[in-house]
Amino acid sequence: MPAYFAAFLRGVNVNGNKIPMDALKTAFTGLGFSGARTVLNTGNVVFASDQPAQELKLLIENGLKSALGYDAPIYLRGVLELEELQNATRALAVPEGCHLYLLLCDDAMLPVELGALFAATPHGKQEQFYPAEGNAFWIVPKGETLSSAFGGKVLGAKQYKARLTSRNWNTIEKIIGLMRQ
């Protein structure tokens, strides 16, 4: 029985990097994945595959480069990993007027590095950071995602461009819902 995965592409439909979601879905179907569906317009794809997770990342990156000219890393997460993160959010107290983001990282040590950066960066008491199994949760007041000192140092920084991508937790919830259907 195939397992469900979500692929998160970085930088889709921002800064002139346009990829139509129909073309993205077609590319995943062309790679042999079943049930490919896109979520929102930001490069999120839910799909099923019998292949081992460790083989999928390179296959998808090469396939998207060939089919769409998209040459950037993807962040792949299985349904069980996303459900574990969903369970972890129950322990987080997200203040009213704040967003919860999931930072999807390229290696298990990056959340530790980001945690140290967060601790060393001035931030208000509502802004919070929590490492979570090779990912991280970031809580930030609405409207301050890019203007916060931490957000400015991480989300647009060249040194992190190929190492992480972020998604609002509401998007992750939609993706988990699709994976369960």
Image (cartoon, grey):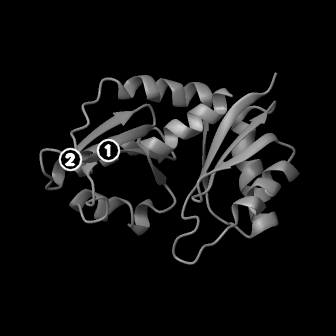
First reached walking from the N terminus: tag 1 or tag 2: 2
Q: x, y percentage for residue 19?
A: 67, 67
Q: Residue at x 79, y 34 (%)?
A: 49
Marks 1 and 2 in Cβ contact (< 8 Å): yes
Question: Could you tell me how far apart the alpha carbons at marks 1 and 2 are, in whole angstroms?
Answer: 7 Å
Q: Quadrant of the C terminus?
A: top right
24, above or below 45, in the image? below
40, above or below 68, in the image? above
Which residue carries the number 2 mark? 127
The residue lying toward the viewer, choosing from 83 and 98, is: 98
93, above or below 7, in the image? above
Q: x, y percentage for residue 101?
A: 38, 45
Q: Residue at x 67, y 36 (%)?
A: 5
Which residue carries the number 1 mark? 138
Q: Amino acid at mark 2?
A: Glu
Q: Disc 1 on helix, strand or loop?
A: strand
Q: Residue at x 38, y 61 (%)?
A: 155
Q: Residue at x 39, y 25 (%)?
A: 88
Q: x, y percentage for residue 100?
A: 34, 43
Q: Amino acid at mark 1?
A: Trp
Circle 2 crowding by C-alpha within 10 Å: few under 14, some 14–19, many from 20: many
Looking at the image, residue 107 sits to the left or right of residue 48; the answer is left
